[in-house]
Image (cartoon, rainbow, N blue to C red):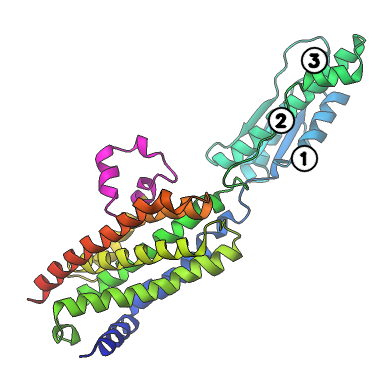
């Protein structure tokens, strides 16, 4: 059987198996739409709150206007009692509640401390954080305005009063992830993980479905079969990777700061290493349902072990070392540095070499495993 005929047979076997076709073709396109969908807005804004204004003064009304003008908060109702506010929260008509105490303006004018009570569901930590951050900003602005008026009352000129209240102006500019959103932060890495996981499942099912029967895979040498299978999956997933790092990055406006040649070099090494790992892993399965269960089970631990969403210093060191054998780990770290942080190639060169080392390691394991299965 020629190389071309063998690769065509591999493609036909992938397409003819419904479980593989759904996982490989359907899974890649399904995750491209489903996973980024909840994070399209990037950050939580305009979270709906209700206000119980027990002071009903000019200053309390000013606080409500400032809260409504805050990007994080939207005041949907002013209510008479906390019980009414809790009913709003229970019915899902609001996500937070703010209580302005009686004597709010009087106590501030007398220089006493006052408390703006804020209530929210901390189970939705991003929503709660947005409400708390918004009310903290409103409280600080109100306090500054009161101090400004007090300084004017003491005879200080407006310019000096303004300078004394804002002696240091903070100009916060994020070095990376300028939108401060979850989408641009972690979705590119998750797309790489999706590529690896669907590839491992597809190759695992393909191998598990063939080891106990006869077919073209028994008519060629082990080296030829392993090489053709790695090439077949690599070609398919380079096309999928082009879709993810081309159309998906453009459509979802994900950061693309790396040079094209560097991105391509990383993707080629990653896809080849993952393909070799998939063929090697397939020799461990004799049931077609096992690859899906095992690969899905380890997906989240791989994401955490990558260090992108959880510090690796808080993960047991043996797990961190063991995770370096997974091609997605060095690929995610290298791609984040190149494509999101504009790192030089020299900074990811070792990770690139690690991917090629994994390719050689898993190719050898694939040869041994497939030979054992076909003997």
State how far apart marks 1 and 2 are (Cα): 20 Å
Q: Who's the residue at 64% across and 41% down the image?
A: 95
- Tell me: residue 309, above or below residue 58: below
First to last magenta residue range: 301-326
Residue under numbered circle 2: 137
Q: Secondary structure at mark 1?
A: strand
Residue under numbered circle 1: 77
Q: Who's the residue at 40% across and 44% down the image?
A: 307
Q: Who's the residue at 34% across and 79% down the image?
A: 18
The tag earlier along the polypeptide, 3 or 2, is 3
Residue under numbered circle 3: 108
Residue 324 falls inside the magenta stretch: yes
Res 371 visible: yes
- Tell me: residue 163, above or below residue 274: above
Q: Secondary structure at mark 3?
A: helix
Residue 87's spot in the image, x, y percent? 66, 39
Residue farthest to the left? 375
Q: Secondary structure at mark 2?
A: helix
Name which quarter of the figure residue 214 lies in: bottom left
**Count of residue discs:** 3
Residue 39 falls left or right of residue 9: right
Name which quarter of the figure residue 119 lies in: top right
């Amino acid at each position: 059987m020629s190389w071309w005929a063998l690769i065509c047979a591999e493609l036909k076997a992938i397409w003819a198996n419904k479980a593989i076709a759904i996982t490989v073709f359907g899974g890649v396109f399904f995750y491209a739409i489903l996973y980024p969908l909840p994070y399209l807005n990037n950050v939580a804004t305009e979270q709906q709150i209700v206000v119980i204004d027990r002071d009903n003064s000019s200053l309390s009304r000013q606080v409500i206007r400032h809260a409504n003008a805050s990007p994080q908060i939207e005041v949907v109702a002013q209510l008479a009692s906390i019980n009414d506010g809790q009913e709003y929260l229970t019915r899902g008509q609001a996500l937070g509640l703010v209580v302005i105490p009686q004597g709010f303006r009087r106590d501030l004018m007398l220089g006493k401390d006052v408390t703006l009570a804020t209530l929210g569901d901390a189970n939705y930590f991003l929503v709660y954080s947005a409400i708390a951050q918004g009310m903290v900003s409103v409280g600080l602005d109100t306090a500054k305005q009161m101090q400004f008026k007090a300084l004017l009352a003491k005879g200080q000129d407006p310019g000096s009063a303004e300078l004394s209240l804002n002696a240091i102006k903070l100009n916060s500019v994020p070095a990376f992830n300028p939108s401060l959103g979850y989408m641009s932060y972690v979705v590119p890495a998750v797309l790489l993980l999706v590529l690896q996981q669907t590839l491992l499942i597809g190759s695992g099912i393909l191998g598990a479905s063939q080891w106990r029967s006869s077919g073209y895979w028994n008519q060629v040498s082990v080296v030829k079969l392993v090489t053709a299978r790695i090439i077949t999956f690599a070609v398919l997933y380079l096309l999928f990777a082009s879709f993810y790092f081309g159309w998906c990055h453009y459509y979802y406006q994900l950061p693309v700061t790396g040079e094209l040649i560097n991105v391509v070099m990383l993707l080629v090494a990653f896809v080849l290493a993952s393909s070799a790992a998939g063929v090697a892993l397939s020799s461990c399965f004799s049931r077609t349902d096992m690859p899906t269960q095992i690969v899905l089970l380890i997906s989240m631990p791989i994401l955490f072990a990558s260090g992108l969403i959880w510090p690796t210093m808080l993960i047991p060191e043996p797990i961190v070392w063991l995770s370096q054998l997974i091609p997605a780990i060095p690929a995610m770290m290298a791609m984040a540095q190149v494509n999101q942080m504009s790192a030089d190639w020299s900074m990811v060169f070792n990770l690139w070499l690690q991917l090629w080392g994994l390719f050689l390691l898993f190719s050898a394991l694939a040869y041994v495993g497939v030979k054992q299965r076909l003997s």
